[in-house]
Image: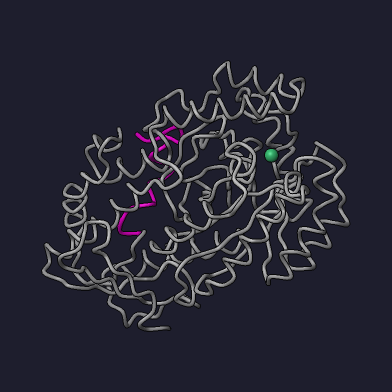
Amino acid sequence: MRTLADGRYLTAANTPWSLWGLLERGLSEADWERAVQEARGCLEGLPAARVPDAAGIVGSLLSEEQLGPDHWRLGTGGWAYYALRRLIPRPARIRLQRQMAARARKGALLRWPVEDRYVRFVAEVVCRLCQRRGLRSVPYVHFWPGGRRFALVLTHDVETAQGMHFVPTLADLEERYGFRSSFNFVPEGYEVDVALLADLRRRGFEVGVHGLRHDGRLFASREVFEKRAVSINRYLRAWQAVGFRAPMTHRNPHWMQSLEIEYDSSFFDTDPFEPMPGGTMSIWPFIMGRFVELPYTLAQDHTLLRVLGQATPQLWLRKVDFLREHCGMALIDTHPDYLRRPECLAVYERLLAEVRRREDFWHALPAEVARWWRTRMSWIARAAGHTGEAAAPGGATIGRITVADGVSEAGRLVLEPAYYVS
Ligand SMILES: [Zn+2]
C-alpha cells in the first residue's frame, strides 16, 4: 500500500510517456517499460539505475529518494553555520563559503552545472521505443506553447527590508527588456509593503511566499513545519499568491503537501552548494503530489557571483544553451539583496540582454508555467493512443521527434517543436 510518505507516490504521475506525449497508436505500457530497461545505462553511477521498474527509477530521481533517507535532515554542521553566520565577519564568511563549496562539489553525487543523465535517459527511452517499432520519427505534444524551444522563468527571493526597497528598481530593469518575474517575500521577516505587492501584480509581475521567517527553522521538526504552514497558507491567500520557495531551499516533499499552493520552486535540477545539496535532475516541471514543482535550473546569483567569484554571465548562458538544446525550462532564482550591488546587477543585466537576443523562448511567470504543465499533462493522458489530428489544448504545438542515424547517443534525438500548430 502506497502512502504519501512514499516519495515515489508523490511523483508517480511523471512517467516517461507523460513527459513525451507521443502521438503514436498502439504503444503499450510494456513497450515503454522495455525501452526504459534498455535505456537505464544512461543513469550510470546513480543509485536510481539499480531500481527495477520505470516508475521507481523516475520517482527516486525526482523525489531525490536516491540520495538516501537522511537527505532531508540538515547536518549539525549546517545548523551551526546558519545559527552563527551573522556573527562571522563578511570576508571570513565568504572564505568559509568558498571552502564549503569546494568540498561540496568534490563529494557530490550529481554533476554541476550540467547534470544530463536524466535528460539523456528520457531521450534514449524514445530512441529505443522507435527502434523497436521501426519508426524513424513520431509526432509528440511539444513541451511549450507556440512551438517555443525553451521556457524562460525569472524568480526572486526578497530576504530583507533592504532587498524589498530595491524591488521596484529591479522590476523596472526587467520591464525595459520586456520581461516579468515573480518576487517571493518573507511574511514575518520584515514589514512587507502590501502596496508594493499590489503594484507588482498590476504591472504583470507575480508575488509569492518565501517561507514564514528567514531563520532556517522552517523544517526544524514536523510540528514546527505544520504550525508555520497554517500561517504560510494564510499569507498565500492574503497576497493572492499560488507559489512558494523555502528559505535556503530547505525542503521536504512530504511535509510540503500541507502547503496550499499551485507550485513550489524550492527544488532544483542540480546544486551542490545549497545547505541541502542534491537535485531532481529534471530540467522540466513535474507533479509533486498536490502541486507542480518548478525546479530552478540556473545557478543562484549568490553562488555564481559571490561563492564562485564570477564576473560575467557566461556560466548562466552556457546552461541556457544546454536547456535550449533539450527544450527545457531555464528558471533562475536571484535576490534583490545581492543585485543591489552595482557589479552584481551589471552581470544580471547582461544575462537579460543576451537571453533577449535568443528569441525562441516562451517567457512566462511561474504560475503560468505550472498551469500550462498541468494542462499539457492532462491532455496527453486523454490523447493516449491518438494521432496528431486530435485537437491539442490552446497554444499547444504538435512537434516531430526524429531519431538520427550515425550520431552520438546524446545528439541522436532531433526535436522539431512545431510542424503543425493547432
Ligand atoms: Zn531566501
Q: From the top left corner, tell me how far across and down residue 378 is, in percent.
A: 43, 64
Q: Is residue 285 left or right of residue 33?
A: right
In front of the other: 383 or 179: 179
Q: From the top left corner, tell me how far across and down residue 133 is, in percent.
A: 12, 66
Give the dominant element type of the magenta stretch: helix, strand or loop: loop
Q: From the top left corner, tell me how far across and down residue 206 is, in percent.
A: 71, 59
Quarter holding the N terminus is top left
Residue at image x 25%, y 36%?
51
Looking at the image, how many numbered discs can be counted on the residues?
0
Residue 14 covered by magenta stretch: yes
* Residue 9 picture quarter: top left
Residue 351 covered by magenta stretch: no
Q: Which residues are magenta?
A: 1-18
In front of the other: 122 or 94: 94
Residue 293 in view in this figure = no
Residue extending farthest to the front is: 311
Residue at image x 51%, y 64%?
151
Q: Is residue 350 left or right of residue 400?
A: right
Q: Quadrant of ligand 1?
A: top right
In front of the other: 398 or 120: 120
From this view, report whether residue 125 is shown above or below residue 215.
below
Residue 14 in view in this figure = yes
Residue at image x 53%, y 53%?
316
Quarter holding the C terminus is bottom left
> Which coloring applies here?
one colour
From this view, report whether residue 135 is shown above or below residue 346.
below
Q: From the top left corner, tell me how far across and down residue 219 is, in percent.
A: 62, 28
